[in-house]
Image (cartoon, rainbow, N blue to C red):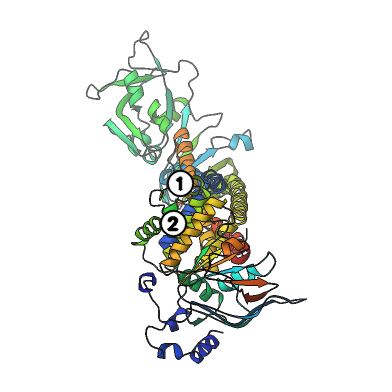
């Protein structure tokens, strides 16, 4: 399995030959599709092509049942696609095994979930530091980096609070800090404002905008067109088919 | 612009697919501990089953070892080399006379393995059975046991003399009227020194006191008696008509059973059944019977407690896995491999088991010590028991955690994160 992956990567070897300032796309789908084996087989994601370049803010929008979750799972390496090749930071990960995908998730992708997924009995600092437990980062600088990440999202004063004592917006900020702290290439947000009221949602989106402005690649999956409007471009997903959405009058 | 955001340990692309996530032992224990401390009360109750199981285990083994060692101390070297031969001729044949022959001591001492042997009996006086230190009739007498004993008896009893000496074969052969006093009896009779050549009067007969016995290692009633040569007693009062004569035999180590077997025949080849030889009980058989009686029952109870403890840990860990599905999904999203999840839950259940085992070991040892103190015993717990008990707890915990940890590893991150 792995040798196949190496072979296929060798076939995409132009990358090292390219000039040093050339950056491969953060994520690139080449005919990626996912069909759950039957009976009867269910095609959750039809083969599609997609390129997200470094520093982009892309939103994926679609109604529930449209294949958003499948797209998230494939993009976030939680599920392996059944066809096509997926290049994450130029690495073909489509055929990567379970262990390799776990390691790639930890290093390349920062997840932000609708339901935050914070550990209820651990302080904000510990929750953020958890993102560095599995990816071979030294213990020594974990606390400092977690503190810096929390300060970055505006929670420098609440680092020792447990999630149950934080407001919804603060919890999502902790989750964003956790997603940032391992310095991923891609911030993958699944309905980041789904559990928040409008005002808090705006502040969280503003934070995502700021991060994007600093150069972070952000991919937000949502059903909410208002949230989708924050992206530089929007991909619509419907019945497992991805389509670039025409954006009329986008100022950005 | 991207430099700032680049991951510090930037890997070459060819390494990316083979650089798997790591989970250092320190992180593993830290995360497991945090997992257990999420619900400290429940963790403590879970460990209680192991505490009880291992505690019972240690207590049973410790108490068995303690009682065994008490038996051991009763069967020390002295009692293991002592044979008593009793005259039971009167029970066999009412016309049988004194069962011991005149040369009984010599016959027994000729047996291989015998060190000293002697016949003794308690002299029962018909009328005035008091012992006096003065011949005058109105002097106050002391009631004392009068023991007729051959010189071999004295040597077999291993006495320590406060003053004077023992009588020997000369006094025995001449039926001399000499007596030995136990130190207690001597004090009651007012005899403090042998320098004044004191005498005691038994049934009106004078006996010269030639020695005061300070202590004996066998046959402690010598200390409370007036001991006279058996030949003298026989001359004055005859042999005990109603039986009751005995023989004390000191043997070499390991010879007791053999000597007991041979002695009746050596003494009375014509009527060996007139004599009953009692060897010391075999300590091995005694210990085995004690161990097998209660020990096995309690070990069974301990095993049942351990099984209950294991089921408790398995149940709690399984509930925790179901409760913490979201956490498992999150950890997988953050780069944990399924084996890291397995390891974490196994560590949690193993730690609970080991902690329960440690506390249980302490509880067991405290029980053993408490029982030993109450019974005035020396507590004995075998070191192997102490070393094995926490390991038993750990094994229980690990075994109980196997299934829940396997379930945890099979949690699909995509499914878990949807919650």
- How crowded pointer 2 is (Cα within 10 Å; few <14, some 14-19, many 20+) is rated as few
Q: Which mark is residue B195?
A: none
Chain of the residue displaying label 1: B
- How crowded pointer 1 is (Cα within 10 Å; few <14, some 14-19, many 20+) is rated as many
Location of residue B356 in the rendering, given as x and y in whole percent from the top left corner: 51, 49
Location of residue A30 in the rendering, given as x and y in whole percent from the top left corner: 58, 83
Location of residue A9 in the rendering, given as x and y in whole percent from the top left corner: 50, 87
Whether discs 1 and 2 lie on one chain: the answer is: yes
Q: Which mark is residue B30?
A: 2
Looking at the image, the residue that sits furthest to the left is: B195
Q: Which mark is residue B80?
A: 1
Q: Nearer the viewer, residue B271 or A174?
A: A174
Chain of the residue displaying label 2: B
A230 relative to B269, above or below: below
Looking at the image, the residue that sits furthest to the front is: A249
Q: Nearer the viewer, residue A95 or A146?
A: A146
What residue appears at the point 50 percent right and 34 percent down from the top-left corner?
B245
Instruction: Please say whether residue B259 is visible from this viewpoint.
Output: no
Q: Is residue B254 left or right of residue B346?
A: left
């Amino acid at each position: 399995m792995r040798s196949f992956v190496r072979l296929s990567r060798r076939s995409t070897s132009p990358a090292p030959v390219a000039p040093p300032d050339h950056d491969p796309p953060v994520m690139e789908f080449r005919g990626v599709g996912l069909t759950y084996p039957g009976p009867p087989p269910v095609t959750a994601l039809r083969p599609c092509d997609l390129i997200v370049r470094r520093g982009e803010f892309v939103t994926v929008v679609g109604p529930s049942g449209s294949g958003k979750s499948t797209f998230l799972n494939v993009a976030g390496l939680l599920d392996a696609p059944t066809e096509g090749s997926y290049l994450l930071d130029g690495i073909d990960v489509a055929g990567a095994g379970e262990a390799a995908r776990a390691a790639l998730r930890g290093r390349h992708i920062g997840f932000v979930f609708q339901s935050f997924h914070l550990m209820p009995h651990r302080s904000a600092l510990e929750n953020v530091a958890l993102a560095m437990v599995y990816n071979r980062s030294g213990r020594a600088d974990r606390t400092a980096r977690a503190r810096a990440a929390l300060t970055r999202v505006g929670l420098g004063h609440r680092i020792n609070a447990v999630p149950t004592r934080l407001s919804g917006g603060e919890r999502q900020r902790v989750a964003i800090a956790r997603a940032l702290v391992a310095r991923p290439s891609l911030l993958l947000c699944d309905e980041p404002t789904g559990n928040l009221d409008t005002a808090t949602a705006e502040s969280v989106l503003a934070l995502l905008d700021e991060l994007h402005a600093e150069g972070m690649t952000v991919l937000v999956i949502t059903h909410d067109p208002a949230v989708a409007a924050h992206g530089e471009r929007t991909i619509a997903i419907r019945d497992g088919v991805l389509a670039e959405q025409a954006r009329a009058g986008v100022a950005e | 612009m991207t430099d700032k955001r680049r991951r510090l340990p930037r890997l070459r692309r060819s390494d990316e697919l083979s650089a798997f996530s790591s989970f250092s032992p320190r992180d593993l224990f830290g995360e497991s501990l945090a997992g257990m401390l999420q619900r400290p009360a429940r963790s403590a109750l879970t460990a209680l089953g192991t505490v009880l199981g291992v505690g019972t285990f240690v207590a049973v083994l410790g108490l068995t070892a303690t009682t065994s060692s008490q038996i051991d101390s009763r069967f020390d070297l002295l009692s293991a080399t002592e044979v008593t031969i009793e005259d039971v001729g009167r029970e066999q044949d009412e016309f049988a006379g004194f069962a011991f022959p005149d040369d009984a001591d010599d016959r027994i001492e000729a047996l291989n393995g015998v060190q000293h042997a002697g016949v003794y009996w308690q002299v029962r006086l018909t009328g005035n059975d008091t012992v006096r230190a003065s011949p005058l009739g109105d002097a106050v007498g002391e009631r004392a046991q009068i023991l007729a004993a051959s010189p071999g008896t004295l040597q077999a009893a291993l006495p320590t003399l406060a003053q004077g000496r023992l009588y020997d074969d000369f006094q025995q052969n001449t039926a001399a009227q000499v007596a030995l006093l136990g130190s207690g009896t001597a004090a009651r009779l007012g005899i403090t020194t042998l320098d004044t050549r004191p005498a005691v009067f038994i049934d009106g007969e004078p006996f010269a006191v030639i020695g005061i016995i300070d202590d004996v290692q066998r046959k402690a009633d010598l200390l409370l008696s007036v001991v006279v040569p058996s030949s003298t007693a026989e001359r004055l009062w005859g042999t005990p008509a109603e039986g009751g004569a005995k023989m004390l035999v000191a043997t070499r180590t390991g010879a007791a059973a053999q000597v007991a077997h041979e002695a009746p025949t050596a003494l009375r080849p014509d009527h060996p059944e007139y004599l009953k030889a009692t060897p010391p009980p075999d300590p091995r058989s005694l210990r085995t019977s004690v161990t097998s009686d209660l020990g096995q029952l309690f070990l069974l109870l301990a095993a049942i407690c351990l099984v209950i403890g294991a089921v408790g840990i398995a149940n709690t860990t399984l509930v925790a896995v179901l409760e913490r599905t979201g956490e498992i999904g999150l950890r997988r999203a953050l780069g944990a491999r399924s084996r890291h999840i397995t390891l974490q839950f196994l560590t949690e259940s193993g730690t609970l088991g080991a902690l329960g085992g440690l506390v249980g070991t302490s509880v067991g040892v405290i029980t053993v010590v408490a029982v030993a103190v109450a019974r005035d015993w020396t507590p004995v717990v075998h070191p192997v028991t102490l070393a094995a008990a926490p390991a038993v707890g750990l094994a229980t915990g690990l075994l109980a955690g196997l299934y829940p940890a396997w379930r945890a590893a099979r949690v699909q991150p995509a499914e878990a994160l949807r919650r």
